[in-house]
Image: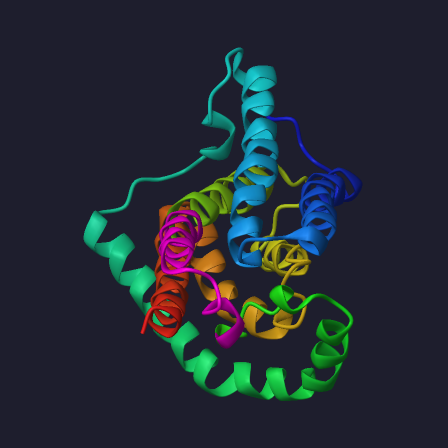
């Protein structure tokens, strides 16, 4: 039997893990001797991922009698691989258009606020400061690129999709057409470490989340999320290893 989650339970499950990660990152980042983006990925691997997967495992234990990821696969339907890939690519294309037209506008709107916040923090918290990143040794930069690629393209998005589009979406007590969009909004807001891209993130993820919900197949959103992060990783690696 599925244990439904109310609004309070939903908020606690989402914002306690990200608060733990963000506060830990903020603390250790003050003394960081490695690229902050590498520090974040390491902390994400050992804080955020275990907590989110742990909640799925615990739910599966309560609902099915054994630790597994089964609670993330409630009422999921199979789709042909080509159809899953096609829908994910269409959603990726929409996100690409939004990154070209919507993201720059949002960045401009929040530019002053973002700059003011970053000016109060050590320089490493600005992941787009590539000149600072290039002050690290080549081996450290290669390690950063490798770890960031693995975490951001595979570990992070797969875990988040299992948690948000799989477990939370299926267990939320209010099931209607707005449910996947509501979860997307909370998913965007939970990115405390990237607080100035919420409008773009919501608009970009909404189509994939909605398609996954209607088709009952969150492999669509997993592929979409991995594609998006792969695109950003390629840009990052090209910028600091040129």
Quadrant where the C terminus is found in the figure: bottom left
Q: Nearer the viewer, residue 64 or 42?
A: 42
Along the line of sight, the residue nearer the viewer: 4 or 227 = 227
- Quarter of the image holding residue 181? bottom right
Residue at figure coordinates x 62%, y 46% from the top left: 175
Q: Position of residue 97 (x, y in %)?
A: 41, 81
Residue at x 50%, y 63% (from the top left corner)? 205
- Using the image, determine if residue 140 lies above or below residue 11: below
Quarter of the image for residue 105 reads bottom right
Residue 91 shows in this picture:
no
Q: Whole-percent x and y of residue 46?
A: 56, 35
- Residue 76 spot, x, y in % from top left: 41, 38
Q: Is residue 73 visible?
A: yes
Q: Nearer the viewer, residue 3 or 145?
A: 145
- The vertical placement of 188 against 50, above or below, is below
Residue positioned 35% across, 56% down in the render: 142
Tell whether position 172 is magenta.
no
Q: Residue furthest top?
A: 65
Residue 237 screen position, x and y as percent: 36, 66
Q: Which residues are magenta?
A: 131-152
Q: Nearer the viewer, residue 135 or 231?
A: 135
Question: The N terminus appears in which quarter of the rendering?
Answer: top right
Q: Is residue 209 left or right of residue 185?
A: left
Left or right of residue 114: residue 161: left
Examine the residues drawn in magenta and state their main secondary structure: helix
């Amino acid at each position: 039997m599925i244990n439904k989650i109310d609004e309070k339970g939903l908020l606690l499950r989402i914002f306690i893990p990200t608060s733990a990660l963000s506060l830990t990152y903020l603390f250790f980042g003050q003394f960081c001797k490695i690229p902050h983006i590498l520090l974040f990925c390491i902390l994400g691997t050992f804080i955020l991922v275990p907590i989110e997967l742990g909640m799925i495992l615990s739910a599966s234990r309560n609902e099915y009698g054994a630790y597994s990821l089964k609670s993330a696969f409630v009422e999921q339907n199979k789709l042909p691989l080509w159809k899953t890939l096609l829908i994910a690519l269409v959603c990726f294309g929409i996100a690409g258009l939004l990154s070209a037209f919507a993201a720059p506008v949002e960045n401009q709107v929040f530019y002053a606020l973002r700059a003011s916040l970053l000016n109060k923090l050590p320089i490493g918290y600005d992941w787009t400061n590539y000149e600072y990143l290039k002050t690290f040794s080549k081996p450290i930069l290669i390690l950063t690129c490798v770890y960031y690629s693995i975490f951001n393209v595979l570990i992070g998005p797969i875990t988040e999709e299992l948690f948000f589009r799989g477990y939370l979406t299926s267990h939320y007590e209010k099931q209607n057409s707005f449910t996947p969009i509501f979860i997307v909004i909370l998913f965007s807001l939970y990115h405390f470490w990237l607080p100035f891209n919420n409008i773009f993130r919501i608009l970009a993820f909404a189509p994939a989340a909605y398609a996954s919900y209607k088709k009952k197949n969150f492999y669509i959103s997993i592929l979409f999320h991995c594609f998006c992060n792969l695109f950003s990783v390629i840009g990052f690696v090209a910028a600091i290893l040129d």
